[in-house]
Image (cartoon, rainbow, N blue to C red):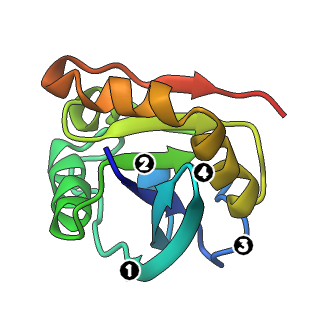
Amino acid sequence: MEKLRVATASDDGENFVDRHFGDAEFFHVYDVSPEGIEFILAVENKTEEEEGHADPKKAKGIVGILKKQGVQVGLTRAFGPNIKRIKSKIVCVLTARKAVSDGLELIQENYDTVVAEWDKGEDRHFLNLKRE
């Protein structure tokens, strides 16, 4: 695989949110390869919870936003209960790093592992790369 399309959960484009992935104001989308990182665009998260925490409609909305941009990987510090719904559509990657740039470098460092998880299709699991 030549590159991965990664969405980060960030309100400001600099740091990950301290909330669940789906609660970010924006998803900043990047193309990541072992050779480099390229910013693509910021997409506003317009999903809202209608049925409370772990709303399946919210999960579907988030997946729709990300799939429209060709996203394969979601990268953040925390996922909520909807991770069980979205991990079949994208690779969910957890990081302990605060800066988006550091998290993206973590994807580069673990590129083959992330690609292998993507290749599992709907049977994929989330990746816990929570190390500083």
* Helix, strand or loop under label 1: strand
Q: Where residue 62 appears, x then y in whole percent?
A: 26, 58
Amino acid on which the number 2 mark rests in the picture: Gly
Answer with mark 3 or mark 4, whichever residue precedes in sequence: 3
Q: Nearer the viewer, mark 3 or mark 4?
A: 3
Q: Which residue is mark 2?
A: 74
Measure the alpha-carbon separation of dots 1 and 3.
15 Å
Name the residue beneath numbered marker 4. 19
Examine the rendered structure and indicate whether residue 46 appears above or below residue 132.
below
The residue pinned by badge 3 equals: 14
Q: Quadrant location of residue 100?
A: bottom right
Give the mark nearer the N terminus: 1 vs 4: 4
Looking at the picture, which amino acid does disc 3 mark?
A: Glu
Can you say which quadrant of the picture contains the N terminus? top left
Residue type beneath disc 4: Arg
- Could one spot residue 108 in this view of the protein? yes
Distance CA(mark 4)–CA(mark 2): 14 Å
Mark earlier in primary sequence (1, 2): 1
